Amino acid sequence: MTDVLLDRPATASIASRSVAATASLAPGELESYRRELTGYCYRMLGSGFEAEDAVQETLLRAWRHAGRFEGRSSVRSWLYRIATNVCIDMHRHVQRRARPMEMGPSSPPEESFLGPLLPEGTWVLPISDARAAPESTDPAEIAQYRESVRLAFVTALQHLPPRQRAALILCEVLRWQASEVAELLDTSVAAVNSALQRARATLDSLRDDAHPRMLDDTAADLLRRYVEAFEHYDVERLVQLLHEDAVQSMPPFAMWVKGAQNIGRFMLEPGPSACRGSRLVATAANGCPAFGQYKPDPAGGLAPWSLQVLEISGGKITSINHFLALVDLESLFPAFGLPSHLGGPADEATGLEPVTSLQS
């Protein structure tokens, strides 16, 4: 890319940059689009970290060239044009991200099948809802957001060429008109419609998971029981909360396990058994309930180990996506507003509530 990306977590205000403001754009106007651009770039790139980098680059480019903005299009469409180009530029330099379920068949529930640690760029990674979810109380808008950032859908999007991906997200997720997308992509409406047709055919050909459902009181009770079972490491109780065909994955390892009983067996393997005594702290990711898992630290207290993203359907947990802190030890937990350590003075400093008080 032509401009250098800033270091993570890329949350500094663009308006605070030492760049002269122009009469055409108010200082805070660009910054107000950060959240929705983050959601767009995440769907394009499949990584919360890369999405934030892309948004920061987008806003920097926009601010540097604000004097060229003549008002012939809306600020929003102008920013999306820049963001699309940034994402396409970034996509040229990385491989297609995936989930472990795409890397090969499920493994027996034995620790010996873990295999090597694979690079962070291998994986579709989660995103915090606090950074990308719409600031809306409209149930339909919230449901649409959850559907469009679920891990299976974001993974499927990565199979599309970048311009097809952009057309599909803009038209079918963000509800832009084909004419608006054609203008953004510098192409014709016919070309956009053709790209959409090809993109839909590709997505239809991919195996999809059962869609997670909106959370209700029943799901909240299920999550409470999950936390209790996990923190007590009561594997028998935990297995009862899982769908019989539930899956568990553990990036940066390619290994994944299918079936409630197999997940329970794997939890009793020597390595996973070190998770006894863990504590879960609630957060939210990809429109799903999530937990930061902290396991006992030999040096004292509890150290970050895994971000667990749970998917629920039919009153059961259908998927436990463990994103181990090994993926990006320095950035993963802070990106979800989670503390870097629990226990003793560090725990007191966080002001954490007991984990039984779950976020809805």
Image (cartoon, rainbow, N blue to C red):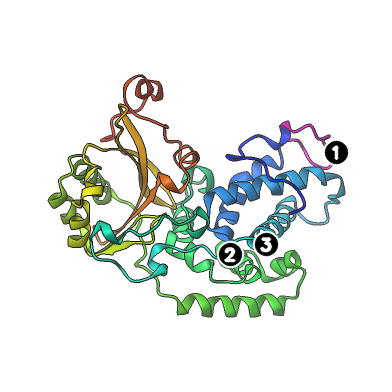
Q: Classify the position of the N terminus by image quarter.
A: bottom right
**In the rendered image, which quarter is residue 279 located in?**
top left
Q: Amino acid at mark 1?
A: Ala
Real-space Cα distance between discs 3 and 1? 30 Å
> Measuring 42% from the left and 35% from the top, which residue is drawn there?
338
Give neighbour class at mark 2: few <14, some 14-19, many 20+ (Cα, 10 Å): many
Q: Nearer the viewer, mark 2 or mark 3?
A: 3
Q: Is residue 101 above or below residue 66?
A: below
Residue 188, x across and y down, in percent: 75, 75
In the image, 320: left or right of 99? left
Task: Label 2, secondary structure: give it.
Answer: helix
- Residue position for label 1: 23
Q: Is residue 283 above or below residue 115?
A: above
Farthest residue in the left direction?
Answer: 236
In the image, 239: left or right of 255? left
In the image, 245: left or right of 199? left
- Residue position for label 2: 169
Identify which residue, 348 or 249, lies in the foreground: 249
Identify which residue, 213 or 97, lies in the foreground: 97
Q: Classify the position of the C terminus by image quarter.
A: top left
Of pointers 1 and 2, the one earlier in the residue sequence: 1
Q: Amino acid at mark 2?
A: Ile
